[in-house]
Image (cartoon, rainbow, N blue to C red):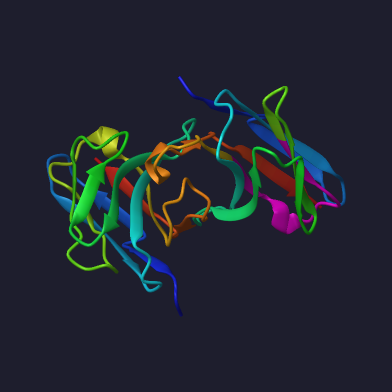
Amino acid sequence: KNQVEQSPQSLIILEGKNCTLQCNYTVSPFSNLRWYKQDTGRGPVSLTIMTFSENTKSNGRYTATLDADTKQSSLHITASQLSDSASYICVVSPPFSGGYNKLIFGAGTRLAVHP
Amino acid sequence: DAGITQSPRYKITETGRQVTLMCHQTWSHSYMFWYRQDLGHGLRLIYYSAAADITDKGEVPDGYVVSRSKTENFPLTLESATRSQTSVYFCASSFSDRGGNSPLHFGNGTRLTVT
């Protein structure tokens, strides 16, 4: 069964520090891999998207990387801010899937940034 | 403002009652989706719709009914609520169904408690 596993489940860091969140997937190849940020009490919002052939994609202080050999994606947050406190969700779209009904969601990593 | 709106934000209902969750989007996106989010699980697709009057089951459709008479509205009905349907429900929309290449735009969710 195609799966997306995220680690750690939760993480606490101090403001200004960097952190890296992991996403391991089994479906390979895939159409794209996307990271969403979900603030408490809000819906997820797309941060980055990568195709199977891309290695890295940045969005401000957020950088997503992809290692197709190890079937792992990482989301690196630089110089964290209090507003980075949120859940981060990894989503993989299988190839030739015919649509969004085949998206595979990870359970997310809950990040807390403390002052 | 344009966007996707869910109502109510919070709902408490009793077992066996019928309850309808509303979703309205102003982008004229063709595709709309209902997900549920439970602790320890990734978002799970309940139903989706490719256009007005076209709906299809997702991963966990049992106990739910949807309709889409207008492009902008996609209500979700729990015909006879059960405690296992206690969850946070998210509506989402997208203008493209090309293998997930376009992001999902989520509402802010409805937190439903079934007592």
Location of residue A75 with respect to A38 vertically, above or below: above
Q: Is residue A112 left or right of residue B75?
A: right
Image-quadrant location for residue B20: bottom left
The front one of B75 and A72 is A72
The front one of A54 and B3 is A54
Location of residue A91 with respect to B105 vertically, above or below: above
Looking at the picture, how far across and down is residue B115, in whole percent? 24, 40
In the displayed orientation, state which residue is furthest to the top: A1
Residue A101 in view: yes
Q: Quadrant of the N terminus of chain A?
A: top left
Q: How many marks?
A: 0
Looking at the picture, how far across and down is residue A27, in whole percent? 54, 26
Location of residue B82 with respect to A27 vertically, above or below: below
Looking at the picture, how far across and down is residue A45, in whole percent? 56, 56
What is the magenta range? A74-89
Q: Residue at x 45, y 50 (%)?
A: B98
Image-quadrant location for residue A87: top right
Q: Residue at x 72, y 23 (%)?
A: A69
Q: Is residue B71 left or right of residue A89?
A: left
| Magenta stretch encompasses residue A83 | yes
Residue A39 in view: no
| Magenta stretch encompasses residue A100 | no
Location of residue A34 with respect to B23 vertically, above or below: above
Q: Is residue B50 left or right of residue A92?
A: left
The front one of B96 and B22 is B96
The front one of B105 and B51 is B51
Image-quadrant location for residue A13: top right
